[in-house]
Amino acid sequence: EKKKTETVLKDKKSKKRNLSLKEKEANKRSEILQEKNLKKEHIPLNDISNVLGLSNALVVAVLQENEITPKHIINKIEWYPKGEIYQLKETQNGLYDKFEKEYMTFIELRSLNISVASIQKFPVIDVPRLIKMEKFKNSKVVYPKNSVKEYMNQKRREQIQKDITKDITIPFATFERLILALDVSFSDNAPLTQKYWFSYVRQILNKTKGNKQSVKKQINRMVSISELLANITKSKEIFSYSTRELNLLLFNHEVFQEYQITIYAFFNAINNEMPFPVIDLSKIKNPNEIKRRKKISKKEVYSPTEFIQLLDYVKDVELHKQEAINDVHDALNERNKYKKYDSAWLYVLLHMNNGWRSSDFAYNIPRLDLPRKINNISDFEILDLSLDDAKYMVIQLSSKLQSLKHSKNQKTNYFFCSDELMYPLANALIICELRTRLLELNNQHLIDFMNEKNEMLKGTHDAFFANFKKNFKFGSLKMNRTFIGLMTDVVKKKTNRNPLEISKFIRNHSDMDTTNTYIDIPQEHLDYIASQLFDKGYFGYTYDLFSKVLLGETSITPDDSPKKSVLIKNIFGDIYKIENLARYINALEQEDEDLLHYFNDHSETELQEKMLLLNLGQLPAKEANYQCIYGKCIFLERNCSRCPFAVPHFYALTKIAANMEKRLKEYREIHGNSMYWGEKVRISNLLFSDLLVLSHAKQKFGEDVLSAFIKIEYDDLKEQISLLPSPYEYITIKRG
């Protein structure tokens, strides 16, 4: 019974188990069938990643962006409509093709050797999540190919311009080469426009004067305008356009103002060549007038307080010397870390005393000889520059800048350096010269910002002014206006002279409007600012006596005044007997008494005004580089070099030094061969007068400076003089 019961139970369990398996199999078959039916029209989330080629995280984001939701969730698996997913795939393919055709990735740009800095200037487009695959997989943004093409064309153009304008002999020939190389051509519909335009360009370029950069800039401008005119005249001559059309095409905000000015001048030139005007300029927007109005409305200047703050900052030698030297060390170790701090220091210092254009600073500060004790930058780092060496550097610079012309108008560029800025300027000059030597650069100029236009860019600007007040922006033109405005106000308040004429002299503008800038200096800053603006390069007995009288030493008498005999002894003392020159010395001393009486007969106010004008170079004399105390010569028969009322500037040393070798040779020949007493008297007086000026210069500037001017050592000069026949019996009282 028991066994029978167990058997029955087993059968029941077996039947139940078999029934359960069948149910499971049926359920499984049902699920497979259901999944098969789903797959016909749906796709699981995990498979979408393979279809779109995106990561699971991106797929989720893309589905959300496109508002695609699951239709079924079976066993926690989300099923999405296949139609919507493959429609998304088509959208992806189209979008990918569009981006591949129109945009480039950062890696592709770098493969073209485009710098990171340049890439950062391109417009950017965000890469859609839908196409973050293949080459766009790791790109957050892409860059328009048309912008890249424009950039590459511009770089190609710049390289062609750079190569062709490297050596300019005949400007118009260079222009023609550029036109050909850049494939600039006028259409057959505009032969007259081409003829007259090229003729005008030839005239302008043949008259172009200035430094190399100015000429290059002018040529490139003419090429760009040629392209503009060629594009406009594809269908007809420029003369066939109405004035309304010309205003719309050429005289609008999209065309550079300088281009407009040139085109306007071209139209005017054509009208002048024709029997009657072919273009009615009265109906053309005059770009010159627009520029003038803009200048008037945008004449920004620094306040007197800002000028003084900047002055205090740039003359901080302890700060800037070390920063500049550290930066040069960086340049030696890793060039891309170099901030050009030394060039910035020199550039800003020069602006504080000179109203030059930026290009004049950038390209005209010449290489200099260093003081003998300075051989390398390590020596200079631990050396405090002596005042004599500082004076040597600045005067050396002054002598080399004597013939400098403004790049724009080719008028004389006057160089100024106040006493207070002489020491920092000398330090900056030395570091720039050392840097040029260390980096083995072939530059002929000391300021080097290492870019094509040699401009102080933002990185250099921010590095130099890092320790100055926040948000300060240094501008060359703004500082020029400030310098001229300050000088104008000083002259207006301290003299009776026309300040416009004087400020015009400082920058040598050809029109008054450009110098019509005023700054009202508070009275408490007037004297200090005045002392920072004017040159102190004058020397000699007259200048020294003038200064002493102004300093209040009114008790000076002729007997107390410095004796010419002391200076004469410096020249001849070890060579000839001073007493043999007594008659000549007495004549000189008498003239000194007359000079002192002249000073004592004028009020302190009158003398201060004269000294101000003297330092400004506004008391011209008959000879270059002399100033006349009278302001107008009263001794017409005398040369300035032999007149007690003429004050020499150290620039005068250049001419004297240039004549010295010739003078010594002529002296030997006349004293050795001539039988004429008059010739010996003349050459003896000339030699003595020149040596007297040199002795004054030696007393003020030192032997090193003097030696630099006369191109031989001062002691060697004295030795040459000692070998000459004695002049004392020929030197006369007459100084004409």
Image: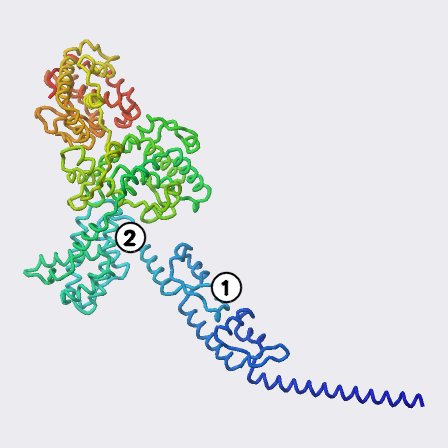
Residue 284 visible in the displayed image: yes
Q: Earlier in the sequence, mark 2 or mark 1?
A: 1
Considering every residue shown, the one lying at the far left of the view is: 275
How many residues crowd mark 1 within 10 Å: few (<14), some (14–19), many (20+)? few
- Residue 297: x percent and y percent? 21, 51
- Residue 481: x percent and y percent? 23, 43
Give the vertical position of 202 relative to 533 (above or below). below
What residue type is disc 2 on?
Answer: Ile
- Residue 460: x percent and y percent? 37, 45
Q: Residue at 50%, 66% (x, y): give it.
A: 137
Residue 673 visible in the displayed image: no
The one nearer the camera, 57 or 49, is 57
The answer for how far apart the CA atoms under marks 2 and 1 are is 42 Å
Name the quadrant containing residue 439: top left
The one nearer the camera, 21 or 237, is 21
> Is 420 left or right of 84, judged from the image as shown?
left
Residue behind mark 2: 164
Task: Name the front one of labels 2 and 1.
Answer: 1
Residue behind mark 1: 138
Q: Give the secondary structure at mark 2.
A: helix
